[in-house]
Protein backbone atom coordinates (compact mmCIF):
# COMPACT_ATOMS: atom_id res chain seq x y z
CA UNK A 1 0.00 0.00 0.00
CA UNK A 2 3.06 2.26 0.10
CA UNK A 3 2.56 5.27 -2.13
CA UNK A 4 -1.11 4.55 -2.81
CA UNK A 5 -3.34 7.38 -1.52
CA UNK A 6 -6.14 6.36 0.78
CA UNK A 7 -8.57 8.39 -1.34
CA UNK A 8 -7.90 6.03 -4.25
CA UNK A 9 -8.36 2.93 -2.09
CA UNK A 10 -11.65 4.27 -0.74
CA UNK A 11 -12.85 5.20 -4.21
CA UNK A 12 -12.04 1.70 -5.52
CA UNK A 13 -13.96 0.15 -2.63
CA UNK A 14 -16.88 2.47 -3.27
CA UNK A 15 -17.04 1.19 -6.85
CA UNK A 16 -16.19 -2.44 -6.16
CA UNK A 17 -18.81 -3.08 -3.46
CA UNK A 18 -21.90 -2.25 -5.54
CA UNK A 19 -20.43 -3.99 -8.60
CA UNK A 20 -19.81 -7.18 -6.63
CA UNK A 21 -23.25 -6.94 -5.06
CA UNK A 22 -24.85 -6.51 -8.48
CA UNK A 23 -22.92 -9.46 -9.90
CA UNK A 24 -24.01 -11.59 -6.96
CA UNK A 25 -27.63 -10.57 -7.27
CA UNK A 26 -27.97 -10.89 -11.02
CA UNK A 27 -25.41 -13.58 -11.84
CA UNK A 28 -25.43 -15.83 -8.77
CA UNK A 29 -28.91 -15.24 -7.44
CA UNK A 30 -30.14 -15.16 -11.00
CA UNK A 31 -29.61 -18.88 -11.17
CA UNK A 32 -32.37 -21.22 -10.08
CA UNK A 33 -33.17 -20.97 -6.39
CA UNK A 34 -35.92 -22.82 -4.54
CA UNK A 35 -36.89 -21.51 -1.12
CA UNK A 36 -39.29 -22.12 1.72
CA UNK A 37 -40.62 -20.12 4.62
CA UNK A 38 -42.22 -21.36 7.86
CA UNK A 39 -44.95 -18.79 8.34
CA UNK A 40 -46.62 -20.49 11.29
CA UNK A 41 -45.77 -23.34 13.66
CA UNK A 42 -47.97 -23.20 16.73
CA UNK A 43 -49.59 -25.50 19.27
CA UNK A 44 -53.35 -25.39 19.44
CA UNK A 45 -53.74 -24.46 23.11
CA UNK A 46 -55.23 -21.70 25.23
CA UNK A 47 -52.33 -19.32 25.84
CA UNK A 48 -54.57 -16.93 27.84
CA UNK A 49 -54.94 -19.38 30.70
CA UNK A 50 -52.41 -19.04 33.48
CA UNK A 51 -51.00 -21.99 35.24
CA UNK A 52 -48.49 -24.71 34.60
CA UNK A 53 -50.83 -26.70 32.34
CA UNK A 54 -52.25 -24.62 29.48
CA UNK A 55 -55.64 -25.80 28.21
CA UNK A 56 -56.75 -26.22 24.60
CA UNK A 57 -59.63 -24.08 23.41
CA UNK A 58 -61.57 -27.20 22.49
CA UNK A 59 -60.33 -30.74 22.33
CA UNK A 60 -59.15 -31.08 18.73
CA UNK A 61 -60.30 -34.21 16.94
CA UNK A 62 -59.55 -35.82 13.61
CA UNK A 63 -61.94 -38.44 12.26
CA UNK A 64 -63.65 -38.44 15.63
CA UNK A 65 -60.43 -39.11 17.55
CA UNK A 66 -58.96 -36.57 20.03
CA UNK A 67 -55.47 -35.39 19.03
CA UNK A 68 -52.55 -35.51 21.42
CA UNK A 69 -50.85 -32.11 21.79
CA UNK A 70 -51.99 -30.89 18.35
CA UNK A 71 -50.18 -28.18 16.35
CA UNK A 72 -50.61 -26.37 13.05
CA UNK A 73 -47.81 -25.54 10.60
CA UNK A 74 -48.07 -23.22 7.57
CA UNK A 75 -45.25 -23.33 5.01
CA UNK A 76 -44.64 -21.32 1.87
CA UNK A 77 -42.72 -22.92 -1.00
CA UNK A 78 -41.43 -20.34 -3.51
CA UNK A 79 -39.13 -19.64 -6.43
CA UNK A 80 -36.77 -16.96 -5.09
CA UNK A 81 -34.41 -16.94 -8.05
CA UNK A 82 -34.48 -15.19 -11.42
CA UNK A 83 -35.12 -18.28 -13.56
CA UNK A 84 -38.17 -20.55 -13.86
CA UNK A 85 -38.13 -23.98 -12.21
CA UNK A 86 -39.58 -26.87 -14.25
CA UNK A 87 -40.19 -30.49 -13.35
CA UNK A 88 -36.86 -31.63 -14.83
CA UNK A 89 -34.96 -29.15 -12.60
CA UNK A 90 -35.74 -31.01 -9.37
CA UNK A 91 -32.95 -33.17 -7.97
CA UNK A 92 -34.78 -36.49 -8.09
CA UNK A 93 -34.89 -39.42 -10.47
CA UNK A 94 -37.20 -38.80 -13.44
CA UNK A 95 -39.47 -41.61 -12.32
CA UNK A 96 -39.80 -40.15 -8.79
CA UNK A 97 -42.76 -37.73 -8.74
CA UNK A 98 -41.76 -36.17 -5.40
CA UNK A 99 -40.04 -32.78 -5.65
CA UNK A 100 -40.17 -31.54 -2.03
CA UNK A 101 -40.32 -33.49 1.26
CA UNK A 102 -41.23 -31.93 4.60
CA UNK A 103 -40.54 -33.86 7.80
CA UNK A 104 -41.77 -32.96 11.29
CA UNK A 105 -39.56 -34.69 13.91
CA UNK A 106 -41.57 -35.70 16.99
CA UNK A 107 -44.89 -35.19 15.23
CA UNK A 108 -47.22 -37.15 13.00
CA UNK A 109 -49.07 -35.57 10.11
CA UNK A 110 -52.80 -35.84 10.65
CA UNK A 111 -53.85 -33.90 7.57
CA UNK A 112 -52.66 -31.27 5.10
CA UNK A 113 -53.93 -29.04 2.31
CA UNK A 114 -52.67 -26.42 -0.14
CA UNK A 115 -54.36 -23.18 0.93
CA UNK A 116 -52.86 -20.66 -1.46
CA UNK A 117 -51.02 -20.64 -4.78
CA UNK A 118 -49.89 -18.11 -7.37
CA UNK A 119 -52.15 -17.59 -10.35
CA UNK A 120 -49.71 -19.32 -12.67
CA UNK A 121 -49.41 -22.45 -10.48
CA UNK A 122 -52.01 -24.96 -11.75
CA UNK A 123 -54.38 -26.49 -9.21
CA UNK A 124 -53.90 -29.87 -10.85
CA UNK A 125 -50.59 -30.28 -9.00
CA UNK A 126 -52.47 -30.62 -5.69
CA UNK A 127 -55.38 -32.98 -6.38
CA UNK A 128 -55.60 -36.05 -4.09
CA UNK A 129 -54.65 -38.57 -6.76
CA UNK A 130 -51.68 -36.56 -8.03
CA UNK A 131 -48.44 -38.63 -7.93
CA UNK A 132 -46.03 -37.20 -5.40
CA UNK A 133 -48.73 -35.36 -3.41
CA UNK A 134 -49.24 -37.34 -0.21
CA UNK A 135 -48.58 -37.67 3.52
CA UNK A 136 -46.85 -40.57 5.26
CA UNK A 137 -46.69 -40.49 9.06
CA UNK A 138 -44.41 -37.48 9.81
CA UNK A 139 -43.59 -36.53 6.19
CA UNK A 140 -45.45 -34.48 3.59
CA UNK A 141 -44.56 -35.14 -0.05
CA UNK A 142 -45.08 -32.45 -2.66
CA UNK A 143 -44.91 -32.95 -6.42
CA UNK A 144 -42.47 -31.37 -8.88
CA UNK A 145 -44.41 -28.15 -9.17
CA UNK A 146 -43.51 -25.83 -12.06
CA UNK A 147 -42.75 -22.41 -10.57
CA UNK A 148 -42.15 -19.30 -12.61
CA UNK A 149 -40.12 -16.45 -11.16
CA UNK A 150 -41.57 -15.31 -7.78
CA UNK A 151 -44.32 -17.96 -7.95
CA UNK A 152 -45.29 -19.75 -4.71
CA UNK A 153 -47.79 -21.98 -2.98
CA UNK A 154 -48.66 -22.58 0.69
CA UNK A 155 -49.18 -25.83 2.59
CA UNK A 156 -50.98 -26.07 5.94
CA UNK A 157 -50.55 -29.20 8.05
CA UNK A 158 -52.27 -30.45 11.19
CA UNK A 159 -50.02 -32.55 13.42
CA UNK A 160 -49.98 -34.30 16.77
CA UNK A 161 -47.25 -35.43 19.10
CA UNK A 162 -45.68 -38.88 18.58
CA UNK A 163 -46.33 -41.09 21.60
CA UNK A 164 -42.63 -41.76 22.18
CA UNK A 165 -41.50 -38.10 21.84
CA UNK A 166 -40.86 -36.63 25.28
CA UNK A 167 -39.19 -33.26 24.55
CA UNK A 168 -41.21 -30.16 25.63
CA UNK A 169 -40.70 -28.37 22.31
CA UNK A 170 -40.84 -29.75 18.78
CA UNK A 171 -37.89 -29.37 16.40
CA UNK A 172 -38.36 -27.17 13.39
CA UNK A 173 -39.71 -28.74 10.19
CA UNK A 174 -37.05 -30.24 7.92
CA UNK A 175 -37.56 -29.38 4.24
CA UNK A 176 -35.63 -31.41 1.70
CA UNK A 177 -35.42 -30.47 -1.99
CA UNK A 178 -33.00 -29.32 -4.61
CA UNK A 179 -32.77 -28.00 -8.16
CA UNK A 180 -30.13 -28.65 -10.80
CA UNK A 181 -27.84 -25.67 -11.42
CA UNK A 182 -29.11 -23.80 -8.40
CA UNK A 183 -27.24 -21.67 -5.88
CA UNK A 184 -25.28 -23.54 -3.17
CA UNK A 185 -25.51 -26.92 -4.89
CA UNK A 186 -29.17 -26.34 -5.58
CA UNK A 187 -30.38 -27.18 -2.06
CA UNK A 188 -33.58 -25.51 -0.97
CA UNK A 189 -33.00 -22.28 0.94
CA UNK A 190 -34.89 -21.09 4.00
CA UNK A 191 -36.09 -17.58 3.25
CA UNK A 192 -37.34 -14.84 5.50
CA UNK A 193 -39.52 -11.77 5.21
CA UNK A 194 -37.74 -8.48 5.90
CA UNK A 195 -39.87 -5.35 6.44
CA UNK A 196 -36.83 -3.15 5.63
CA UNK A 197 -34.15 -5.16 3.84
CA UNK A 198 -32.52 -8.56 3.93
CA UNK A 199 -29.35 -9.16 5.85
CA UNK A 200 -27.07 -9.04 2.75
CA UNK A 201 -28.70 -5.78 1.69
CA UNK A 202 -28.24 -4.36 5.17
CA UNK A 203 -24.56 -5.33 5.08
CA UNK A 204 -24.20 -3.71 1.65
CA UNK A 205 -25.80 -0.50 2.88
CA UNK A 206 -23.57 -0.49 5.95
CA UNK A 207 -20.44 -0.90 3.80
CA UNK A 208 -21.50 1.90 1.46
CA UNK A 209 -22.16 4.18 4.43
CA UNK A 210 -18.70 3.38 5.83
CA UNK A 211 -17.11 4.13 2.45
CA UNK A 212 -18.92 7.48 2.27
CA UNK A 213 -17.88 8.36 5.82
CA UNK A 214 -14.28 7.42 5.08
CA UNK A 215 -14.25 9.61 1.97
CA UNK A 216 -15.71 12.53 3.92
CA UNK A 217 -13.17 12.14 6.72
CA UNK A 218 -10.35 11.97 4.18
CA UNK A 219 -11.65 15.08 2.43
CA UNK A 220 -11.86 17.14 5.61
CA UNK A 221 -8.51 15.80 6.81
CA UNK A 222 -6.79 17.04 3.67
CA UNK A 223 -8.52 20.39 3.99
CA UNK A 224 -10.85 22.39 1.80
CA UNK A 225 -8.06 24.08 -0.13
CA UNK A 226 -6.39 20.80 -1.02
CA UNK A 227 -9.69 19.48 -2.41
CA UNK A 228 -9.89 22.39 -4.81
CA UNK A 229 -6.23 22.12 -5.87
CA UNK A 230 -5.97 22.12 -9.68
CA UNK A 231 -3.39 20.32 -11.77
CA UNK A 232 -1.44 23.59 -12.13
CA UNK A 233 -0.53 23.71 -8.44
CA UNK A 234 3.20 23.90 -7.84
CA UNK A 235 5.31 24.22 -4.72
CA UNK A 236 7.88 26.88 -3.99
CA UNK A 237 8.19 30.65 -3.76
CA UNK A 238 7.28 32.85 -6.72
CA UNK A 239 8.76 36.36 -6.96
CA UNK A 240 6.65 38.88 -8.87
CA UNK A 241 7.82 42.30 -10.07
CA UNK A 242 6.76 44.99 -12.50
CA UNK A 243 3.58 46.88 -13.29
CA UNK A 244 1.77 48.81 -10.56
CA UNK A 245 -1.25 49.11 -12.89
CA UNK A 246 -1.61 45.32 -12.83
CA UNK A 247 -0.96 45.11 -9.09
CA UNK A 248 -4.63 44.64 -8.03
CA UNK A 249 -4.89 41.61 -10.32
CA UNK A 250 -1.62 40.11 -9.10
CA UNK A 251 -2.49 40.65 -5.43
CA UNK A 252 -5.83 38.84 -5.70
CA UNK A 253 -4.51 36.11 -8.00
CA UNK A 254 -1.53 35.47 -5.70
CA UNK A 255 -3.79 35.26 -2.63
CA UNK A 256 -6.18 32.87 -4.39
CA UNK A 257 -3.40 30.71 -5.85
CA UNK A 258 -1.64 30.25 -2.51
CA UNK A 259 -4.99 29.45 -0.87
CA UNK A 260 -5.73 26.84 -3.51
CA UNK A 261 -2.17 25.49 -3.57
CA UNK A 262 -0.91 25.19 0.04
CA UNK A 263 2.67 24.47 -1.05
CA UNK A 264 2.99 27.77 -2.95
CA UNK A 265 4.17 31.13 -1.56
CA UNK A 266 3.93 34.45 -3.42
CA UNK A 267 5.18 37.30 -1.19
CA UNK A 268 4.19 40.77 -2.40
CA UNK A 269 6.09 43.40 -0.46
CA UNK A 270 6.09 47.15 -0.94
CA UNK A 271 9.13 46.93 -3.21
CA UNK A 272 7.83 44.10 -5.40
CA UNK A 273 5.78 46.09 -7.92
CA UNK A 274 7.43 49.45 -8.65
CA UNK A 275 6.81 49.75 -12.36
CA UNK A 276 7.26 47.88 -15.62
CA UNK A 277 10.87 48.81 -16.39
CA UNK A 278 12.17 48.27 -12.84
CA UNK A 279 10.41 44.88 -12.86
CA UNK A 280 12.07 43.87 -16.12
CA UNK A 281 15.43 45.10 -14.79
CA UNK A 282 15.01 42.97 -11.66
CA UNK A 283 14.16 39.88 -13.74
CA UNK A 284 17.13 40.43 -16.05
CA UNK A 285 19.46 40.90 -13.08
CA UNK A 286 18.25 37.71 -11.41
CA UNK A 287 18.68 35.80 -14.65
CA UNK A 288 22.16 37.14 -15.15
CA UNK A 289 23.22 35.87 -11.74
CA UNK A 290 21.73 32.42 -12.21
CA UNK A 291 23.86 29.64 -13.60
CA UNK A 292 21.53 28.31 -16.27
CA UNK A 293 21.87 25.56 -18.79
CA UNK A 294 21.32 26.23 -22.47
CA UNK A 295 17.56 25.43 -22.46
CA UNK A 296 16.75 26.25 -18.86
CA UNK A 297 14.97 29.25 -17.41
CA UNK A 298 14.11 30.72 -14.04
CA UNK A 299 11.07 28.94 -12.70
CA UNK A 300 10.46 31.18 -9.69
CA UNK A 301 10.30 34.70 -11.17
CA UNK A 302 7.84 36.66 -13.31
CA UNK A 303 7.85 40.32 -14.35
CA UNK A 304 4.71 42.07 -15.60
CA UNK A 305 4.93 44.99 -18.00
CA UNK A 306 2.38 47.41 -19.45
CA UNK A 307 3.42 46.85 -23.03
CA UNK A 308 6.48 45.27 -24.65
CA UNK A 309 9.99 45.58 -23.31
CA UNK A 310 12.63 47.63 -25.03
CA UNK A 311 15.33 46.02 -27.15
CA UNK A 312 18.44 44.55 -25.62
CA UNK A 313 17.01 41.78 -23.40
CA UNK A 314 16.60 38.76 -25.70
CA UNK A 315 16.48 36.38 -22.71
CA UNK A 316 13.18 37.86 -21.52
CA UNK A 317 10.35 35.93 -23.16
CA UNK A 318 6.85 37.50 -23.38
CA UNK A 319 3.47 35.92 -22.57
CA UNK A 320 0.55 38.26 -23.36
CA UNK A 321 -1.95 38.08 -20.48
CA UNK A 322 -4.56 40.80 -20.85
CA UNK A 323 -5.56 44.03 -22.49
CA UNK A 324 -5.16 46.77 -19.88
CA UNK A 325 -7.19 49.96 -20.05
CA UNK A 326 -5.87 53.32 -18.93
CA UNK A 327 -7.63 56.61 -18.48
CA UNK A 328 -6.89 60.27 -18.02
CA UNK A 329 -8.04 61.58 -14.64
CA UNK A 330 -8.61 65.13 -13.42
CA UNK A 331 -9.38 66.76 -10.11
CA UNK A 332 -13.04 67.54 -9.46
CA UNK A 333 -12.63 71.31 -9.89
CA UNK A 334 -11.47 71.37 -13.54
CA UNK A 335 -14.99 71.32 -15.03
CA UNK A 336 -13.79 69.09 -17.87
CA UNK A 337 -15.00 65.54 -18.60
CA UNK A 338 -14.15 65.19 -22.31
CA UNK A 339 -11.13 66.11 -24.41
CA UNK A 340 -10.33 65.52 -28.03
CA UNK A 341 -7.15 63.65 -28.86
CA UNK A 342 -5.72 66.86 -30.32
CA UNK A 343 -6.51 68.79 -27.12
CA UNK A 344 -4.75 66.14 -25.02
CA UNK A 345 -1.66 66.37 -27.19
CA UNK A 346 -1.72 70.17 -27.06
CA UNK A 347 -1.94 70.10 -23.25
CA UNK A 348 1.12 67.84 -22.93
CA UNK A 349 2.94 69.92 -25.60
CA UNK A 350 2.37 73.08 -23.55
CA UNK A 351 0.10 74.78 -26.12
CA UNK A 352 -2.92 74.59 -23.77
CA UNK A 353 -2.08 75.61 -20.21
CA UNK A 354 -5.43 76.56 -18.65
CA UNK A 355 -8.66 74.57 -18.40
CA UNK A 356 -10.55 77.62 -19.57
CA UNK A 357 -9.05 77.07 -23.05
CA UNK A 358 -11.00 73.77 -23.32
CA UNK A 359 -14.26 75.17 -21.85
CA UNK A 360 -13.37 74.31 -18.28
CA UNK A 361 -12.73 76.37 -15.17
CA UNK A 362 -10.17 79.16 -14.99
CA UNK A 363 -7.42 77.02 -13.48
CA UNK A 364 -3.85 76.38 -14.66
CA UNK A 365 -3.27 72.79 -15.78
CA UNK A 366 -1.03 70.84 -13.39
CA UNK A 367 0.35 67.62 -14.90
CA UNK A 368 0.93 64.73 -12.51
CA UNK A 369 2.87 61.87 -14.14
CA UNK A 370 4.61 58.62 -13.31
CA UNK A 371 8.38 58.22 -13.17
CA UNK A 372 10.24 57.05 -16.30
CA UNK A 373 9.96 53.26 -16.60
CA UNK A 374 6.25 53.24 -15.80
CA UNK A 375 4.22 51.18 -18.26
CA UNK A 376 1.25 53.53 -17.86
CA UNK A 377 3.44 56.51 -18.77
CA UNK A 378 4.94 54.61 -21.71
CA UNK A 379 1.43 53.75 -22.97
CA UNK A 380 0.43 57.43 -22.68
CA UNK A 381 3.44 58.60 -24.71
CA UNK A 382 3.14 55.82 -27.28
CA UNK A 383 -0.61 55.56 -27.89
CA UNK A 384 -2.03 58.97 -26.90
CA UNK A 385 0.80 61.44 -27.51
CA UNK A 386 1.96 59.75 -30.73
CA UNK A 387 5.43 59.03 -29.35
CA UNK A 388 6.14 62.53 -28.04
CA UNK A 389 7.81 62.76 -24.60
CA UNK A 390 6.29 64.51 -21.63
CA UNK A 391 7.29 68.11 -20.85
CA UNK A 392 9.99 68.83 -18.30
CA UNK A 393 9.38 68.41 -14.59
CA UNK A 394 8.92 71.74 -12.80
CA UNK A 395 9.00 70.38 -9.23
CA UNK A 396 10.03 67.18 -7.50
CA UNK A 397 7.21 67.51 -4.96
CA UNK A 398 3.65 67.50 -6.30
CA UNK A 399 2.52 69.35 -3.17
CA UNK A 400 4.55 72.38 -4.23
CA UNK A 401 3.00 72.85 -7.68
CA UNK A 402 2.48 76.58 -8.33
CA UNK A 403 -1.23 77.26 -8.58
CA UNK A 404 -0.42 80.49 -10.37
CA UNK A 405 0.83 78.71 -13.48
CA UNK A 406 1.10 75.29 -15.14
CA UNK A 407 3.60 72.73 -13.92
CA UNK A 408 4.46 69.04 -13.83
CA UNK A 409 5.57 66.61 -11.13
CA UNK A 410 6.22 62.85 -11.01
CA UNK A 411 5.31 60.09 -8.55
CA UNK A 412 6.29 56.45 -8.21
CA UNK A 413 3.01 54.49 -8.30
CA UNK A 414 -0.64 54.62 -9.32
CA UNK A 415 -2.06 55.17 -5.80
CA UNK A 416 0.33 58.07 -5.22
CA UNK A 417 -0.64 59.62 -8.57
CA UNK A 418 -4.37 59.44 -7.79
CA UNK A 419 -3.76 60.98 -4.37
CA UNK A 420 -1.83 63.85 -5.95
CA UNK A 421 -4.48 64.50 -8.63
CA UNK A 422 -7.27 64.48 -6.03
CA UNK A 423 -5.47 66.99 -3.78
CA UNK A 424 -4.10 69.34 -6.47
CA UNK A 425 -6.41 71.99 -8.02
CA UNK A 426 -6.48 71.77 -11.82
CA UNK A 427 -4.53 68.48 -11.88
CA UNK A 428 -4.44 66.05 -14.86
CA UNK A 429 -2.94 62.59 -14.55
CA UNK A 430 -3.08 59.05 -15.97
CA UNK A 431 -4.04 55.77 -14.33
CA UNK A 432 -5.23 52.28 -15.06
CA UNK A 433 -9.03 52.19 -15.11
CA UNK A 434 -9.66 49.80 -12.21
CA UNK A 435 -7.84 52.02 -9.72
CA UNK A 436 -9.49 55.19 -11.03
CA UNK A 437 -13.00 53.70 -10.83
CA UNK A 438 -12.42 52.83 -7.17
CA UNK A 439 -11.84 56.51 -6.31
CA UNK A 440 -14.65 59.02 -5.85
CA UNK A 441 -12.36 62.07 -5.57
CA UNK A 442 -11.12 62.07 -9.17
CA UNK A 443 -12.96 62.14 -12.50
CA UNK A 444 -12.23 60.14 -15.65
CA UNK A 445 -11.88 61.99 -18.95
CA UNK A 446 -13.32 60.76 -22.23
CA UNK A 447 -11.13 60.98 -25.34
CA UNK A 448 -12.96 62.13 -28.47
CA UNK A 449 -16.22 61.27 -26.70
CA UNK A 450 -15.21 57.66 -26.00
CA UNK A 451 -15.01 56.43 -22.40
CA UNK A 452 -12.37 53.95 -21.32
CA UNK A 453 -14.07 50.68 -22.30
CA UNK A 454 -12.65 47.37 -23.42
CA UNK A 455 -15.01 47.32 -26.39
CA UNK A 456 -13.79 50.73 -27.52
CA UNK A 457 -10.16 49.64 -27.25
CA UNK A 458 -10.86 46.34 -29.00
CA UNK A 459 -12.54 48.14 -31.89
CA UNK A 460 -9.86 50.84 -32.15
CA UNK A 461 -12.06 53.76 -31.02
CA UNK A 462 -10.37 54.33 -27.66
CA UNK A 463 -6.59 54.86 -27.85
CA UNK A 464 -5.34 54.62 -24.25
CA UNK A 465 -4.65 50.92 -23.63
CA UNK A 466 -1.79 48.49 -23.64
CA UNK A 467 -1.11 44.77 -23.57
CA UNK A 468 -0.21 43.44 -20.13
CA UNK A 469 2.66 41.04 -20.70
CA UNK A 470 4.24 38.55 -18.33
CA UNK A 471 7.96 38.00 -18.87
CA UNK A 472 10.12 35.04 -17.90
CA UNK A 473 13.88 34.73 -18.07
CA UNK A 474 14.22 31.97 -20.60
CA UNK A 475 11.72 29.13 -20.79
CA UNK A 476 10.62 28.11 -17.27
CA UNK A 477 10.25 24.38 -16.52
CA UNK A 478 6.71 23.13 -17.13
CA UNK A 479 6.38 22.00 -13.51
CA UNK A 480 7.73 25.27 -12.06
CA UNK A 481 5.63 27.66 -9.98
CA UNK A 482 6.12 30.39 -12.63
CA UNK A 483 4.62 28.18 -15.35
CA UNK A 484 1.83 27.05 -13.01
CA UNK A 485 0.89 30.63 -12.08
CA UNK A 486 0.77 31.67 -15.74
CA UNK A 487 -1.55 28.75 -16.51
CA UNK A 488 -3.66 29.75 -13.52
CA UNK A 489 -4.10 33.28 -14.91
CA UNK A 490 -5.22 31.74 -18.21
CA UNK A 491 -7.87 29.44 -16.69
CA UNK A 492 -11.39 30.41 -15.66
CA UNK A 493 -10.51 31.54 -12.12
CA UNK A 494 -7.67 33.72 -13.37
CA UNK A 495 -9.85 35.20 -16.11
CA UNK A 496 -12.52 36.08 -13.56
CA UNK A 497 -9.96 37.95 -11.48
CA UNK A 498 -8.61 39.81 -14.54
CA UNK A 499 -12.11 40.87 -15.61
CA UNK A 500 -13.06 41.95 -12.08
CA UNK A 501 -10.21 44.51 -12.11
CA UNK A 502 -11.26 46.12 -15.39
CA UNK A 503 -8.96 44.23 -17.76
CA UNK A 504 -9.80 41.76 -20.51
CA UNK A 505 -8.08 38.37 -20.99
CA UNK A 506 -6.39 38.30 -24.38
CA UNK A 507 -8.17 35.08 -25.37
CA UNK A 508 -11.57 36.79 -25.04
CA UNK A 509 -10.91 39.71 -27.39
CA UNK A 510 -12.75 39.95 -30.70
CA UNK A 511 -9.33 40.63 -32.22
CA UNK A 512 -6.84 38.59 -30.18
CA UNK A 513 -3.94 39.88 -32.30
CA UNK A 514 -4.37 43.19 -30.46
CA UNK A 515 -2.54 41.48 -27.59
CA UNK A 516 0.39 40.50 -29.76
CA UNK A 517 3.56 41.80 -28.08
CA UNK A 518 5.00 43.42 -31.21
CA UNK A 519 8.53 44.66 -30.79
CA UNK A 520 9.11 42.56 -27.68
Image (spheres, grey):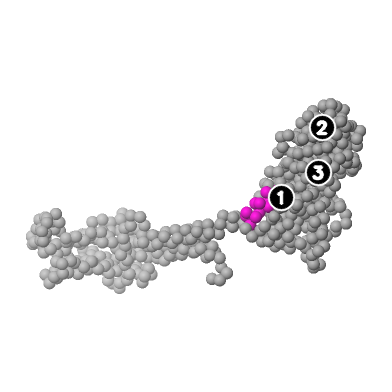
Q: Residue at x 16, y 69 (%)?
A: 167
**Earlier along the polypeptide chain: callout 1 or callout 2?**
1
- Label 1 – label 2 distance at C-alpha: 32 Å
**Earlier along the polypeptide chain: callout 3 or callout 1?**
1
Instruction: Describe residue 378's horizontal placement relative to residue 15 as left or right.
Output: right
Nearest-to-viewer mark from 3 and 1: 3
User: Do the CB atoms of the residues marked 2 and 3 lie less than 8 Å apart?
Assistant: no
Secondary structure at numbered mark 1: helix
- Label 2 – label 3 distance at C-alpha: 17 Å
Instruction: Describe residue 260's horizontal placement relative to residue 72 as left or right.
Output: right
Q: Which residue is mark 3?
A: 411
Q: Which residue is mark 1?
A: 250
- Label 3 – label 1 distance at C-alpha: 21 Å
Which percent across, then down, holds residue 53? Answer: 10, 61
Secondary structure at numbered mark 2: loop
Number of marks:
3
Tell me the magenta residue range: 249-261
- Front position in the image: 149 or 430: 430
Amino acid sequence: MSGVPWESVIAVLGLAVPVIAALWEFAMAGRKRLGYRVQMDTAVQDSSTSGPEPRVFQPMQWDGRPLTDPSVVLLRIENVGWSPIVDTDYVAPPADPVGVSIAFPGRRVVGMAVTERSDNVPRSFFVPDRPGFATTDGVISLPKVILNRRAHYKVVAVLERESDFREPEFPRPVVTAGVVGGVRDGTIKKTEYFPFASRPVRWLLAILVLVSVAQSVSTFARGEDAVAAPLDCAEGTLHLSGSTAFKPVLEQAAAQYTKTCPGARIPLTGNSLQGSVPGLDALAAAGGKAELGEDEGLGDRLAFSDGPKSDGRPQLLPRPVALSLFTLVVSEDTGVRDLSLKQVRDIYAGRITNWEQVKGEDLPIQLVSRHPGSGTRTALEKRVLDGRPLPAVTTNDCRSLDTGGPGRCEVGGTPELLDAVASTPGALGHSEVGSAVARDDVRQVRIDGYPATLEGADQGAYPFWETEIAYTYGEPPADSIAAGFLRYLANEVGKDIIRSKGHRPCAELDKPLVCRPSGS
